[in-house]
Amino acid sequence: MSGERVIKLKTPLIPQAIADLHVGDTVLLSGIIHTARDAAHKRMLEALETGAMLPFPLRGEIIYYAGPSPAPPGRPIGSIGPTTSYRMDRFAPRLIEAGLRGMIGKGERSLEVAEACQRFGAVYLAAAGGAAALLARSVTSAGVVAYEDLGTEAVRRLEIEDMPLIVALDIHGGDIYRQGRERYRR
Amino acid sequence: MRLLHVDDISLTIAELCYRAAVCLPEDMRHALKIAEDAEESPVGKSVLRSLLENADIALAEGLPICQDTGMAVVFADIGVEVLLEGGTLEQAVNRGIARGYKEGRLRKSVVAHPLERHNTGDNTPAVLHLRQIEGDRLRLAVAPKGFGSENMTRLFMLNPTAGEEAVVEAAVHAVDEAGANPCPPVVVGIGLGGTAELALEISKRALLRPLATPAASVAAGNLEKRILERINDLGIGPAGLGGRITALAVHLEEYPTHIAGLPMAVSISCHALRHAEAVL
């Protein structure tokens, strides 16, 4: 999957790098990210509200909305494509306010998430839904860091190299899903 | 009567789980190639290329096409002359699912209770649809359903006099509202008629019809064509990033219904339209 401009990006995300991203740009992302999806988000929000420890510090972090399939022997991870992001919309603005700077997933987000991205300087990156075996190639190491009882929904620390993503929400008010659809609607 | 041991059924189900999750069916691969040629959006084209590349990698490395290997939906048609030995069909199916998901390294995505939400650890139970047929054979189809697309399912209880136009509008509305969520390009299954629950069931069965095979009637085929054109005018495109190819096919199946109603269900599948069949 590739868009108009290709940008190599490293975690943690710094404000200048985020500001430079525009909807439609291809990002090849490298560094450390964490997976978290529905059940992990619910727990993280509870932790934030009660002042308990979070599974990882949120500042400058990127969360990948994903739950992998089991790893084959000798491989860091199984298939790992994005899950649908809107289910995390109820949690994302609070996490962005607390320092989260990137989300990887698929599908449209709510107005509240788009506004939080603009207000706090965060970015939403789209991965190709259904390209899970292909995306697994970008993962060089993986390990569970929290909520192991959740199985595939546990929080995993991933080391990634050149994961192909497209900027879907930027800090300038761009939204690839809205713009893309407008462009091709008849 | 023909004796069939449930262990043979379990083993077959386990194999079908793996095959469905890892091998993208040939008709889908073909449809994606045609779509890649037809797509006007450069990003859309590259998404379709990625999906084809993904299918190759999955097959070569024995990895699931999609990490969401679904809740296992099993369609079983059992011949009247088949006598099961060693247990019930439901037990046999669930043992097969547990084995297939464990040994195939497929993701376990099922929780035991819808509100308490503890993972069952082996992807059981399956959802079993059972029908009786003539003969001494057992036909099995395993069709794991991911929930990115399952969450986009819609049921419409239309007015009985609403006619074709309302059917087209409802189908287009369902896909429009789903947008990027079910991982376009999608296949749309429509169940028309019956009762509410039957409309839903046949909408799901409709997804299993091989791509590019004709509908049951010319009228249904024309309706499918009309709906597909309208859907592909929505602009949603591959991965929802904008483009011409939002759906690869629309499959519509019908059933008699009541004078006061026109039930219509829309089931959506992503390109990972997984299904594998066997006859025992």
Image (cartoon, rainbow, N blue to C red):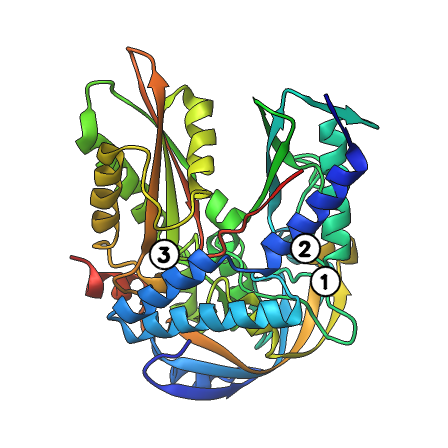
User: Of residues B134 and B128, which is closer to you in this image?
Assistant: B134
Q: Residues within 10 Å of mark 3 (few under 14, many from 20)?
A: few
Q: Residues within 10 Å of mark 2 (few under 14, many from 20)?
A: many
User: Of residues A168 and A165, which is closer to you in this image?
Assistant: A165
Describe the element under mark 3 as helix, strand or loop: helix
Sequence order check, earlier mark of 3 and 1:
1
Circle on res. B107: 2
Q: Chain of mark 3?
A: A
Furthest toward the right, the residue is B86
Q: Amino acid under label 1?
A: Pro
Q: Amino acid under label 3?
A: Leu
For the residues bearing labels 1 and 2, Cβ distance under 8 angstroms: yes
In this view of the protein, can residue A181 be seen by the observer? yes
Distance between the Cα atoms at labels 3 and 2? Answer: 32 Å
- What residue is shown at x 42% (from left), y 68% (from top)? A117
- What residue is shown at x 20% (from left), y 66% (from top)? A183
**Up/down of A105 relative to A30, above or below:** above
Distance between the Cα atoms at labels 3 and 1? Answer: 34 Å
Distance between the Cα atoms at labels 1 and 2? Answer: 6 Å
Q: Provide the residue designation for mark 3.
A: A111
Q: Quadrant of the C terminus of chain B?
A: top right
Q: Chain of mark 1?
A: A
